[in-house]
Image (cartoon, helix red, strand yellow):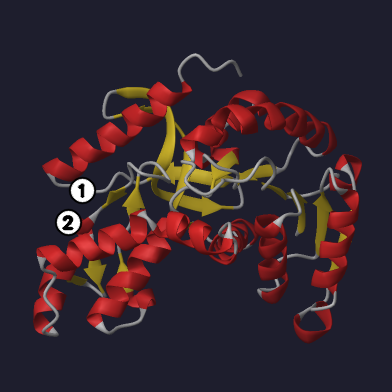
Amino acid sequence: MKIGIIGAGMVGSSAGFALILQRQASEIVLVDVNHARAEAEAEDIAHAIPFCTSAIVRAGDYSDLAGAGVVILSCGVSQQPGETRLALLERNAEVFRVVIAGVMAACPDAILLVASNPVDLMTQITTRLSGLPPGRVIGSGTILDTARFRWLVGQHLGISPNSVHGYVLGEHGDSEVLAWSNARAGSVPLESFAAQVSAPLTGDVRARIDKGVRQAAYTIIQGKGATWFGIGAGLARIVAAIAGDERSVLSVSTLEDEVFGVPDVALSLPRLVGQAGVSATLWPDLNEAETDALRASATVLSDRLAGLAP
């Protein structure tokens, strides 16, 4: 599959590198306002090709995106230390008005994969600007938060994170919801599994994991300026589900008509992802506290977007 990447910064280039390592792209085109940066990243990624695959990686402009099946949107201004994802909205919305016009002119049939923060709001804005059905505009959402959740739970239980089945829902940000009540290790409810391996999920343990998931980005940004490896791998995972028509269940963000009484809001829920994009939303069974928290997360996003012109 031909993949376009708008924004050749650390997130975009890490996604391109991950796609090459996972052999998910036949061609990658990097587009950036700094064309020299796009050329440098394309050449650097291309030097990995002999070790793992056969593909074309090059820099280009919007016209070179023609025929792309997926376009990753990792453009815009970056999050600064101490800045919330929501504070990025006004700055990145203006960037996207220009970007979406260029992408839609070149490849109107592509699925748009949004990585720029605040990702849920940028997903909703991208849906408005593109005019595409919601299932064809996918935000990376909480795919990375879910990975962090599974990794931390796996560390506590002493098992592979691939054996942990749990999701982070709602906003990719401060109001996100760790769905503890329906999480499992293998086929066993998490509480039961934890008791069986003598690693109980005490309140302190849950609080530590919650903090590790919820504040991970801020910790990484403080230490190195931005996050890129984890989200790069997450974006490649979403592309793999699309390219392989996997119909995999992933926690990604798309625009919903209503979430627990909150209308027209993009946030993350478990969704079926395949060749057509998102084909179905799976509403998880949540306890009362988690349901209230997800409604509150939807309200935060809805309130933040209110009044912003598309």
Examine the rendering and report whether any part of residue 309 can be seen: yes
Instruction: Decide which of 294, 133 is in the foreground and name it.
Output: 294
- Left or right: residue 302 versus residue 50 is left
Lateral position of residue 49 relative to residue 287, left or right: right
Residue at 35 percent across and 30 percent down: it is 300
Amino acid type at circle 2 is: Ser
Image position, residue 302 (x, y; %): 40, 25
Q: Earlier in the sequence, mark 2 or mark 1?
A: 2
Residue 29 vertical position relative to residue 20 in the rendered view, above or below: above
250 up-or-down from 153: above or below? above
What quarter of the picture does the C terminus occupy?
top right
Q: Quadrant of residue 8?
A: bottom right
Dots 2, 1 in contact, CB < 8 A:
yes
For the point 36% across and 75% down, the residue is 161
Using the image as rendered, state which of residue 1 and residue 286 is in the foreground: 286
Q: Could you tell me the amino acid type at mark 1?
A: Asp
Q: Look at the image and tell me whether residue 250 can be seen.
A: no
Read off the residue under disc 2.
Answer: 181
**Residue at left offset 68%, top offset 40%:** 76
- Residue 285 is labelled as 1
In the image shown, does 270 or 198 lie closer to the viewer? 198
Label 1: few (<14), some or many (≥20) within 10 Å? few
| In the image: residue 77, left or right of residue 183 | right
Instruction: Give the quarter of the figure containing the N terminus.
Output: bottom right
Provide residue 47's location: percent of width, then percent of height.
Answer: 85, 77
Distance (Cα) linking label 2 and label 1: 8 Å
Q: Which mark is residue 136?
A: none
Secondary structure beneath label 1: loop
Q: Secondary structure at mark 2?
A: helix
Which quarter of the picture shows residue 149?
bottom left
